[in-house]
Amino acid sequence: MQRSAGYICAALLILGLSTAARAEDPSWVGVFVNDEQSDAGIQKAIEAAVADMNFLTRPIARSRLKKTNSMAKRIVISRQGETISVRFDERKPAEMPADGSAVKWTGEDGEQFDVFARVEDARLVQTFKAEDGQRVNSFSPEDAQRLTLEVQITSPRLPKPLTYTVRYRRDAASAR
């Protein structure tokens, strides 16, 4: 009897610790804002990505990349159970399973993507795949108050990937 009570106590302790660990959000969860940085770095990265294209296709690629790569002023990342949600500004949020499996997601412009997310070390990696390429967003916490977003866009139509980095700070008004 005494031995089984010890097992029960140990099991309850383990269960309690695992529930507490699950209840604590990862540091990439929250509301993050950027009210200081301009999108000049993104524009420069777009120019570098299309620089080696011919004069006919370069303006088309530049225009499409500028349209889909404006700098978000606000990012909201949440995790509810086994679902991760990422929302840029007031755009439609992308919701995906936390287990890395892909789901269909349709953007505001009607384009359909396979979207999935995975957690690597302390960062969240979100991927959008379409017929003509993919976008990978890596959200890495610098500390409890800052988040770095690294973007990489690849396509068979681009001579090299479009890559850029934007830094955000945790929104004090919506702090946990």
Image (cartoon, rainbow, N blue to C red):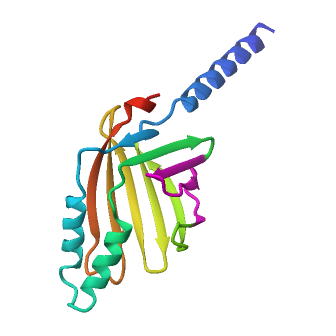
**How many numbered circles does the render carry?**
0
Q: Residue 4: percent from the left, percent from the top? A: 77, 14
Q: Residue 76: percent from the left, percent from the top? A: 46, 45
The structure residue drawn at horizontal position 53% and vertical position 54%, both measured from the top left corner, is: 93
Residue 17 is inside the magenta segment: no
Quadrant occupied by the N terminus: top right
Work out whether residue 121 or residue 157 is closer to the camera in this orientation and state it: 157
The structure residue drawn at horizontal position 42% and vertical position 71%, both measured from the top left corner, is: 134
Q: Residue 171: percent from the left, percent from the top? A: 38, 35
Work out whether residue 161 or residue 33 is closer to the camera in this orientation and state it: 33
The structure residue drawn at horizontal position 31% and vertical position 34%, both measured from the top left corner, is: 143
Does residue 108 appear to the left or right of 27 in the view shown? right
- Which residue, as the protein is rendered here, is positioned at the far right? 1
Q: Residue 159: percent from the left, percent from the top? A: 26, 81
Residue 16 found in image quarter: top right
- Depicted 84 relative to depicted 70: above or below: above
The structure residue drawn at horizontal position 20% and vertical position 73%, both measured from the top left corner, is: 47
Does residue 109 appear to the left or right of 64 in the view shown? right
Residue 94 is inside the magenta segment: yes
- Depicted 88 relative to depicted 160: above or below: above
Residue 44 found in image quarter: bottom left
**Which region of the structure is painted magenta?**
83-105
Work out whether residue 94 or residue 115 is closer to the camera in this orientation and state it: 94
- Depicted 117 relative to depicted 8: above or below: below
Does residue 51 appear to the left or right of 171 in the view shown? left
